[in-house]
Image: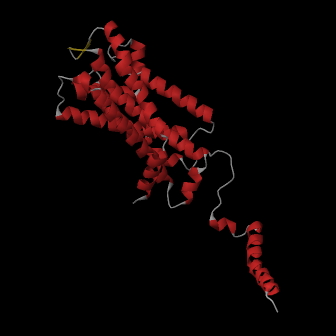
Amino acid sequence: MSGLARLVQRDLRVMNRSLLVIQLVLPLFLLFVASFPFAALIEPLRLGGEAVTYQRFLASGLIAQTTMTGALIGGTLLFTDRRHGMFEQILVGPYRRGEYAASKVVSSVLVGLGGAAIVAVFGLPFTFGIAPTAIGVVVAFAAVLASAFLFAGVSVVLASRFRSLEAFEGTFNLLLILLTFVSSALYPLDAAPGVLRWIMLLNPLTYAVDLVRFGVLGLGTSTLAWEAVALAEAPRQGPGGVGATLPDTPTPPGPPVRRRGDLEGDPMVQKLVQLFEARPVHLEVEEERDTPE
């Protein structure tokens, strides 16, 4: 088993299981609770010249949103390791920084894909009567996979820059809210006002949502081709340098990790060695005293 595979296995084992449940709370709430009263207030949306109910529109968008939520867990994994000193301990072993960074990205991508699959299964009742084409399924999966790698890489890079738990949690919660509500996951891009529409076009979640919606429902937007190119290029420009950011990453204050070679000249270690070397002599003397004449 390679070092990367061992680190990914370790991440999946120690990961807080509650995080896997929490990432499904918002999409399932929107899908089964909020979508029904909203559908009574919102008329069927016109996308690509076709009428789409709000539940069907929302179900396809939440697949990409759940992928993003799961992928952002990579930053939490990295920050937790650094806070508890595991980052330094792992690097003492036969692992490179690049393998460690890649493991966080791969682990969070797997979590994001798993969450997207669960939401897709729950969203099946809202897509009855729709038979996606093979090309549509490939497009939707490629969009989910590319967005998972993008958000996982971004979360790892951002987490490597934080030292305060409060700042880390506050920033990531704010980022999650902004990315979700300033995207086309909850409302169509073409229906947004001018300024908000341009802001939404800067959000990579919008690209993933529109491509998943195109693959599942066959509905496109006026900027779909540009979004596909941007999403395909973003993972290479974003998380490609994740491993390079870790060597300069400031670690939380604490005792330095000392390797075996650094202990040879330590005065305390030398005293301990002398003590243990001298102890058998005292034991032999004690044994001679206890021996009856």
Q: Is residue 220 above or below residue 192?
A: below
Looking at the image, the residue that sits furthest to the bottom is 293
How many dots with numbers?
Answer: 0
Residue closest to the eye, 146 or 74: 74
Q: Is residue 66 above or below residue 76?
A: above
Q: Residue at x 41, y 40 (%)?
A: 237
Residue closest to the eye, 277 or 181: 277
Q: Residue at x 26, y 22 (%)?
A: 126
Q: How is the image coloured?
A: secondary structure
List x then y, in percent, for residue 131. Answer: 17, 27
Viewer can see residue 184: no
Q: Is residue 1 above or below residue 180?
A: below
Q: Residue at x 42, y 35 (%)?
A: 70
User: Which part of the image, by quadrant, shows the N terminus?
Assistant: bottom left
Viewer can see residue 197: yes
Q: Is residue 213 left or right of residue 69?
A: left
List x then y, in percent, for residue 116. Answer: 34, 33
Q: Residue at x 31, y 33 (%)?
A: 229
User: Which part of the image, by quadrant, shows the C terminus?
Assistant: bottom right
Q: Is residue 205 left or right of residue 214?
A: right
Looking at the image, the residue that sits furthest to the front is 292
List x then y, in percent, for residue 87. Answer: 56, 50
Q: Is residue 83 left or right of residue 57?
A: right
Residue closest to the eye, 79 or 190: 79
Q: Is residue 184 above or below residue 279?
A: above
List x then y, in percent, for residue 146. Answer: 34, 38
